[in-house]
Image: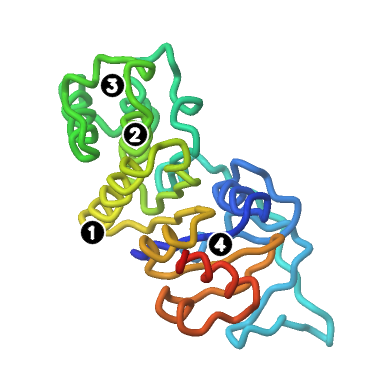
Amino acid sequence: KGETLGLVGESGCGKTTTGRSLLRLHEPTSGRIIYDGETIFDSGDVPLYGEDGKPRTADGKPVFGKKTAVNMLPYRRKMQIVFQDPYASLDPRMTVGDIVGEAIDIHKLASGKQDRQDKIIEMLRRVGLNSEHANRYPHEFSGGQRQRVGIARALASHPKILLMDEPFGAVDEITRHSLQDEILRIYHELHITIFFITHDIREALRLGTRVMIMKDGNIEQFDTPGVVKKQPQTEFVRQLLSYLNE
């Protein structure tokens, strides 16, 4: 809670699948998802674990959880996503104001039209845009500005967790660094949990208070950036870190 987690790995290793499964944008086929002590998904085929980290047993047999899949609407407000492609994730027929305002409408966060408009402008300003941008359409913006709109939309519901799926992959290097700074600023201002997915080890180490390194669907290492750099646990992690010297 209140940390930035950088999930890093090669293309195709399962980063996006992991993130989308946690939000149940992909429905998992197996496993368990627990949010703030509440089980929001349980396939029923994975043993429960005790506080000692070992599977719980009864009469010598493993104890399984109850098959569960809750209604996600109440959790959608708490967990939001910023997609990789800012253009594909924004409706081209809607103004930026309506795109940001949609989350406010769905979760009934405004007391009236003026309050709705004020909240939209507040969100746009938080990501470096202004009131004039509210009446424009996505095609009128640069890639970096579109991604700012996507971030504003995600923040509009005041989420507890913000999942960012390689959000800077479609922008140039200068814009990428500018948006990284914006994310750090938002993180320090709002104190929300950010789950940041990237293939760039530099980005993960810069943005993450902790870093999780994935290979072929498995976690290779989960540590603070300092520990990852000083004590890589596997050869794959060492290879990733070798790119820092290039």
Q: Nearer the viewer, residue 221 or 58?
A: 221
Residue 40's x, y, as percent? 58, 54
Q: Amino acid at mark 1?
A: His
From mark 2 to mark 4, how far is it between C-alphas? 33 Å
From mark 1 to mark 3, how far is it between C-alphas? 25 Å
Query: Residue at point 34% right, 34% down?
Result: 144
- Ranked by sequence position, the earlier of labels 1 and 3 is 3
Q: Residues within 10 Å of mark 4 (few under 14, many from 20)?
A: few
Task: Point out which mark residue 144 bears.
Answer: 2
Query: Residue at point 58% right, 46% down?
Result: 20
Q: Secondary structure at mark 1?
A: helix
Return the residue at label 4: 34
Q: For this view, does 135 lie left or right of residue 9?
A: left
Q: Nearer the viewer, mark 2 or mark 1?
A: 2
- Ranked by sequence position, the earlier of labels 3 and 4 is 4
Residue 62's x, y, as percent? 79, 78
From mark 3 to mark 2, how far is it between C-alphas? 17 Å
- Ranked by sequence position, the earlier of labels 2 and 4 is 4
Q: For this view, does 220 lie left or right of residue 194?
A: right
- Ranked by sequence position, the earlier of labels 2 and 1 is 2
Return the residue at label 1: 188
Q: Amino acid at mark 4?
A: Ile
Return the residue at label 3: 97
- Ranked by sequence position, the earlier of labels 1 and 4 is 4
Query: Residue at point 46% right, 77% down?
Result: 229
Query: Residue at point 68% right, 84% down?
Result: 54
Q: Nearer the viewer, residue 235 or 50?
A: 235
Q: Is residue 171 above or below residue 204?
A: above
